[in-house]
């Protein structure tokens, strides 16, 4: 009897320890997504706590759609709807946001010798009024053109949605991206996606602030993931935080 009891206790402890590495990542409709922090894999459970998908490399919401973006253990990319049925591609949904927010504007103003970056903060909704200040001054030397990540000399955003505030310097044969006091230089840049600026240096690609510049081929992001090939022929995906799969 004692031996049987010890065996049952040991078995119960083994089951308990098996789940100790699981971390809740997100809830999706009636499903939960868990990450095994030791194996670095994901699983999806239904409302009855049954595992319906496991050994996944990546799971996240597909943008603002009611869908999931998933990489399976073989690095196959797929999308699933709220009933966890595979779909060809997610459809974006209408997002409701709060309208009582502060608004911001950044503008490039030209003086005789410098480009000035003017920042406007409109907090009238909080009864704090409007503040306008010059936050940067950039010498015109060697600069052929200057703009923000939207390819314009002005950006507008609010507390609901931030917009990249990098300043792009067109130097003719190269480009600079200025963030605060730091400038990084590249052979070319691609501003199709202002939130993920593709940069090129010595025939290799990367995403500014996200990845190293080491890819022979680097596709555009599809929601959270971009497909790549390194100069050594390795293929995979990189997420919008720079993690590779």
Image (cartoon, grey):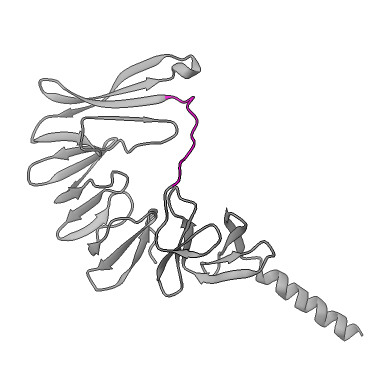
Which span of residues is magenta-colored? 93-102
Q: Which image quarter is the C terminus in?
A: bottom left
Q: Give the left or right position of residue 37, taking residue 164 as reference.
A: right
Q: Give the left or right position of residue 98, taking residue 130 as reference.
A: right
Q: Quadrant of residue 35?
A: bottom right
Residue depicted at x 43% and y 50%: 63
Residue depicted at x 10% and y 20%: 112
Q: Magenta stretch mostly in which secondary structure?
A: loop
Q: Position of residue 178 (x, y in %)?
A: 24, 38
Q: Quadrant of residue 220?
A: bottom left
Name above or below for residue 185 compared with residue 242.
above
Q: Position of residue 93 (x, y in %)?
A: 45, 46
Q: Position of residue 177 (x, y in %)?
A: 22, 42
Q: Give the left or right position of residue 93, taking residue 146 as reference.
A: right
Task: Choose between 7 and 155: the one closer to the eye.
Answer: 155
Residue depicted at x 7% and y 42%: 172
Q: Residue furthest right?
A: 1
Let me know if residue 100 is in the magenta part.
yes
Residue depicted at x 28% and y 49%: 208
How many marks do you count on the picture? Answer: 0
Q: Which image quarter is the N terminus in?
A: bottom right
Task: Choose between 68 and 23: the one closer to the eye.
Answer: 68
Q: Quadrant of residue 71?
A: bottom left
Let me know if residue 161 is in the magenta part.
no
């Amino acid at each position: 009897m004692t031996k049987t009891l010890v065996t049952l206790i040991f078995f119960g402890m083994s089951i308990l320890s098996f789940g100790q590495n699981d971390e809740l990542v997100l809830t999706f409709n009636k499903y939960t997504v868990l990450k095994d922090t030791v194996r670095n894999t994901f699983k999806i459970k239904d409302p009855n706590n049954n595992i319906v998908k496991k050994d996944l490399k990546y799971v996240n919401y597909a943008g603002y759609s009611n869908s999931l973006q998933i990489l399976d253990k073989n690095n196959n990319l797929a999308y699933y709807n709220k009933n966890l049925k595979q779909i060809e591609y997610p459809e974006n949904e209408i997002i409701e946001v709060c309208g009582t927010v502060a608004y911001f504007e950044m503008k490039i103003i030209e003086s005789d010798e410098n480009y000035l970056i003017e920042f406007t903060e409109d907090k009238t909704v909080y009864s704090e009024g409007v503040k306008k200040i010059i936050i940067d001054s950039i010498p015109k030397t060697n600069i052929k053109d200057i703009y923000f990540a939207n390819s314009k000399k002005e950006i507008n955003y609010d507390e609901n949605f931030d917009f990249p505030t990098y300043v792009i310097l067109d130097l003719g044969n190269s480009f600079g991206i200025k963030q605060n006091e730091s400038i990084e230089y590249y052979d070319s840049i691609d501003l199709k996606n202002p939130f993920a600026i593709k940069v090129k240096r010595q025939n290799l690609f990367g995403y500014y602030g996200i990845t190293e510049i080491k890819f022979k081929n680097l596709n555009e992001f599809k929601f959270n993931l971009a497909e790549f090939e390194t100069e050594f022929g390795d293929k995979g995906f990189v997420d919008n935080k720079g993690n590779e799969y």
